[in-house]
Amino acid sequence: MTKFGVGFSELSDSFNAGVTAAQEAIQSLELPESKINICFLFCTSRHEAELFYNGVKHVVGDCDYLGGFANGTITNNNFGYDGYQCVVGLLSSDEIESHFFIEKGIAFNEYETGKGLFKQIAETEFNGIPKMLLLFDAVNREKGRFQMNFGTPLLQGAIEEIKTWPDIVGARLMGDMKFKPTHQWFKNEMTHNSAMALALTGNIEMDVLRLDGCTPASAYHTVTKCEGAAILEIDGVPAMDFVGKMMGPQIENDYEQMKFFVTMGKNLGDKWDRKNAEYVNRMCVGVNPKNKSLIMAEADLKVGTEFQFMRRGQEMDLIEESVTFFTQNIEREGKKPLFALYLNCAGRANAYSQNYTEDAIHVQNAVNNKFPILGIYEAGELAKINGDFQVFDWTGVFCLFSQKNEVN
């Protein structure tokens, strides 16, 4: 038998928050004497990480732990961010096997970290095709100032080891929008500056729905000069000057507003067919007025890359409709949903977008308490697109874990 339970808390006392969320998760399992295989746990950076962890362990006891800081959390009936939100998810199963992998030292070392982590995975013999979750630290403060840990070089290192991508989703973890130092939990230890992977095998299925958060707002333009994640020129014009002219006087001289406002999309599908477009979005996370560059969240917008400026915002009714249709199709395929893992870009939250309501509410409405939701707000969601595994911005990844229904 397999069961999944979820608990939520917004208590400011970190130990009691862990206790409360864990107790709620235990109660929702409806199997009080069952063995817990995996405890997923996430909390914002406002919490004392060790106290929160100890509170969860006080209730759950010995098992394998996996999680880290998140900007906020989501369950079936609760959501929130930028406060003291935390979530605990418990998996109890005698039909599912779990395999844990970790590679430490991701800061300034993403490519090697990806190779090291996925070399471990490539050398592991699985009983069946694994369903995988990748989590890694977003925050690099090893030199005292913030720099993003990039996902694209990590994935470049990974694919050299495994050659083809399994069924996999992931997230880049942060605890707040100021990118304070982070914490992670792996099996029975606290860590940071790491990339972690969980592989599930046995009676477990995983289906993924990607909810895009942007639409094109310009013609195609080209990166003509860059250094790493810094775009120096667009169409031969200094990047900040180009953006300023395009966005108008309200943005032109407001350097701070360019951060987290400017978003660029690479179309991996048909360039001229909007119905078959497949966008990977990149947000601007900083500017450098000295060389008039835009600092992007990833370093994959190279010289010659064509992109479009993107308009953030999603049709909320379409989110609800898409999740409902997706879930119904899975049930028609003879699968019984166990729980949904919702990896939601922090920028999609109402406080940081032009949305009129929270997308979490529409996901909750679509699920309608049919199965548990374990959701987090994070700094980059990962999913497959056209068979490739990519890091996204302004995107929601709705991942539904299920089992095949027994045939009488």
Image: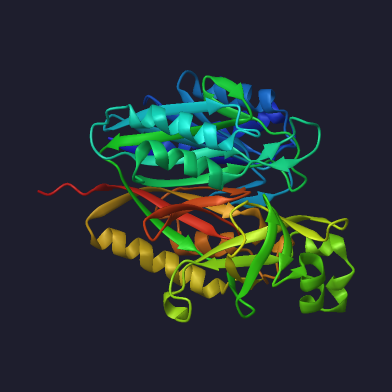
Q: Quadrant of residue 95?
A: top left
Query: Quick check: 212 above or below 160?
Result: below
Residue 164 position in % (x across, y down)? 34, 45
- Left or right: 130, with 372 as reference point: left
Identify the colour scheme used: rainbow
The residue depicted at 54 percent of the width and 51 percent of the height is 381
Out of 391 and 72, give the one closest to the viewer. Answer: 391
Identify the residue at horizontal 41%, vertical 39% (top origin): 160
The residue lying toward the viewer, choosing from 226 and 325, is 226
Task: Name the spot of residue 327 as percent of width and height, x first.
Answer: 36, 61
Q: Give the image quarter of residue 145.
A: top right
Can you give x and y, in whole percent of width and height, for residue 292 in the image? 83, 61
Taking the image as drawn, is residue 30 in sight? no
Along the horizontal axis of the image, is 226 left or right of 362? right
Is residue 235 among the parts visible in the rendering?
yes
Query: How far from the left and from the top, in percent, is residue 242?
Result: 77, 72
Q: Is residue 192 left or right of residue 392?
A: right
Q: Is residue 260 left or right of residue 165?
A: right
Task: Give the residue displayed 88% in from the left and 55% down from the top.
Answer: 290
Q: Nearer the viewer, residue 284 or 383?
A: 284
Image position of 373 with respect to 211: above or below: above
* Quarter in which the N terminus is drawn: top left
In the depicted structure, whether residue 118 falls above or below residue 263:
above
Determine the residue located farthest toward the left in the rendered image. 408
Residue at position x 58%, y 54% in the image: 300
Count how many numbered circles sit on residues in the image. 0
